[in-house]
């Protein structure tokens, strides 16, 4: 079986460490390839390549850097289906969903194409007599990205186009579970004319990550993954003097008011809960029904819809299934374990996805769509992120109870409210302690020119991904206050300078 190595200085480099991990095709359960787990020395070589490229790249005019992004955008559009096929093959999500992932990543590349405009900075003439002031947004140096399995293309593209367009160089450490599509991004950037060393991809696990978090040449760390690791990344990177944005896990609630349109709710909820087998950080995993009538009706309608769902391989089957397998056998077992737990905890299991076998794909890592009713806030299946196709219905009596429930949860990534009442929606927007809010929109993922990020334990660090925050994160501000000789001719001033 092939072993995937690293991409250093635009060249594929074989891994030298003795360690590797296996990448599976989750649809069949078969091993697909090995990925080399880089040693500390190999990781340092990637940092060295990025460090060497920084001087030249940071001095390249933003317009020229943007042109590389334009060429990358064209190549990514051309090769969109190849990239999507690789995502589907190793992650398991269905092909049309993988195409959507590539599109959402492409949008950040489009945003980065506008970098000359985004780096213009600020200018204030005459801040004092004959004195002007302006800000420069300068690149940081070597930036690092560490990314999760669930979006092997979109999440790296939240970071690296902005970082690179700002004039930084980059070391990316993709998920070891599905690295091939991420590696293809590196090849396309090289083809687009990105100079050697500006992007380096190093495959690996904790050994590589720990070097990236502590090496003094690294200036910033962008991370997306689970909350315990995000917290570790943030505290370690910060303790080593790096700026850090670390996005963590989620438990996203959809509040359903009695006046909501039931058809719209059910259609939205099915996609939001079960799309990508629930392996999305913005998936809805809790439906909060205001009133028993809303809940009874919703559960009945969901039962009907779930019975029509097709679960199967992400590619190669017509018509395309609605949902693919989970990423690994361990994850399949973990999600099934949570379903066992929900039953033990006393929730009502309405639809059970355990033990699902797909004909012709009996060894795939499948769990079918699962629905629990009468879940309570004390249960672990409510409190913890399951990250699978498991939807919990929680019943409350009032809007205030629903709002409190969402606000009391430790995570605050995304949420949505379904209602016809503008006043209710407005109060929800104002008072909910969650970073991304949808009103009659189930998965409110912000566009590339806005910022993506949650609240509470869904994020560590002050700046979100892409949009204005992305540019802020990947640049250092320098403010210049300038006076030309006319002022100096007036003679030295020994008192504290004030604006006269
Ligand atoms: P993960 O935390 O297991 O892994 C993420 C990255 O960290 C990977 O590159 C992995 O190799 C590395 N890593 C894992 N353990 C490590 C350790 N002990 N030390 C150093 N590095 C380590 O996450 P995952 O399972 O790949 O992804 C799923 C998680 O990501 C879910 O919790 C999901 O909610 C979250 N996620 C969040 C967002 C968001 O925007 N908030 C987006 C996507 C995914």
Image (tube, grey):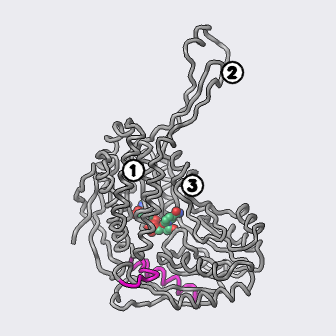
Q: Which residue is mark 3?
A: 450
| Quarter of the image where one finds residue 29 | bottom left
Return the x and y of residue 200 as percentages of the image width and height. 32, 52
Q: Secondary structure at mark 3?
A: loop
Sequence order check: which comes first, mark 1 or mark 3?
Answer: 1
Q: Which residue is mark 2?
A: 498
User: Which quadrant would the C terminus be assigned to in this image?
Assistant: top right
Residue 500 located within the stretch drawn in magenta: no
Residue 339 located within the stretch drawn in magenta: yes
- 39 displayed left or right of 349: left
Q: Nearer the viewer, residue 420 or 428?
A: 420
Sequence order check: which comes first, mark 2 or mark 3?
Answer: 3
In the image, what residue occupies the spot 38% across and 41% down? 64
Q: Which residue is mark 1?
A: 70
User: Which quadrant would the N terminus be assigned to in this image?
Assistant: bottom left
- For the question of whether residue 346 can be seen, the reply is no
């Amino acid at each position: 079986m092939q072993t995937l190595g690293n991409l250093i200085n635009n060249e594929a480099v074989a891994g030298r460490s003795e360690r590797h991990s296996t990448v599976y095709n989750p649809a069949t359960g078969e091993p697909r390839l090995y990925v080399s787990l880089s040693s500390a020395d190999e990781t340092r070589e990637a940092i060295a390549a990025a460090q060497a490229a920084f001087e030249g790249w940071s001095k390249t005019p933003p317009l020229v850097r943007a042109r590389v992004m334009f060429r990358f955008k064209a190549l990514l559009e051309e090769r969109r289906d190849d990239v999507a096929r690789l995502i589907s093959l190793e992650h398991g999500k269905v092909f049309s969903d993988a195409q959507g992932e590539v599109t959402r990543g492409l949008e950040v590349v489009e945003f980065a194409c506008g970098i000359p405009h985004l780096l213009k900075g600020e200018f204030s003439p005459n801040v004092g007599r004959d004195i002007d002031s302006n800000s420069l947004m300068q690149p940081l140096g070597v930036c690092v990205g560490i990314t999760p399995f669930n979006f092997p293309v979109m999440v790296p593209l939240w970071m690296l186009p902005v970082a690179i367009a700002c004039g930084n160089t980059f070391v990316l450490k993709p998920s070891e579970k599905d690295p091939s599509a991420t590696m293809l991004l590196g090849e396309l950037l090289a083809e687009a004319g990105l100079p050697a060393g500006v992007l380096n991809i190093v495959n690996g696990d904790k050994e590589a990550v720990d070097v990236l978090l502590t090496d003094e040449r690294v200036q910033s760390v962008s991370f997306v993954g689970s909350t315990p690791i995000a917290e570790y990344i943030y505290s370690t990177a910060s303790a080593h003097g790096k700026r850090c944005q670390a996005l963590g896990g989620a438990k996203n609630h959809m509040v359903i008011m009695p006046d909501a349109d039931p058809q719209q709710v059910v259609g939205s909820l099915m996609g939001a809960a079960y799309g990508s087998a629930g392996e999305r950080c913005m998936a809805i995993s809790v439906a909060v029904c205001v009133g028993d009538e809303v809940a009874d009706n919703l559960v009945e309608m969901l039962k009907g819809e779930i019975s029509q769902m097709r679960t199967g391989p992400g590619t190669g089957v017509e018509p395309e299934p609605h949902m693919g397998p989970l990423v690994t056998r361990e994850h399949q077992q973990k999600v099934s374990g949570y379903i066992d737990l929900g039953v033990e905890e006393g929730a009502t299991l309405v639809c059970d996805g355990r033990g699902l076998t797909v004909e012709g794909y009996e060894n795939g890592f499948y769990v079918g769509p699962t629905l629990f009713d009468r879940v309570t806030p004390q249960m672990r299946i409510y409190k913890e992120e399951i990250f699978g196709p498991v939807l919990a219905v929680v019943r409350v009596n009032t809007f205030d109870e629903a709002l409190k429930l969402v606000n009391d949860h430790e995570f605050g990534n995304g949420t949505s409210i379904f209602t016809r009442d503008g006043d209710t929606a407005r109060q929800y927007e104002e008072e909910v302690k969650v970073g991304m809010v949808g009103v009659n929109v189930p998965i409110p993922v912000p566009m590339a020119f806005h910022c993506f990020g949650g609240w509470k334990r869904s994020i560590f660090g002050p700046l979100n991904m892409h949009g204005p925050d992305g540019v802020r994160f990947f640049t250092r501000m320098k403010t210049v206050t300038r006076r030309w000789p006319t002022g100096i001719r007036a003679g030295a001033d020994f008192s504290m300078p004030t604006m006269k």
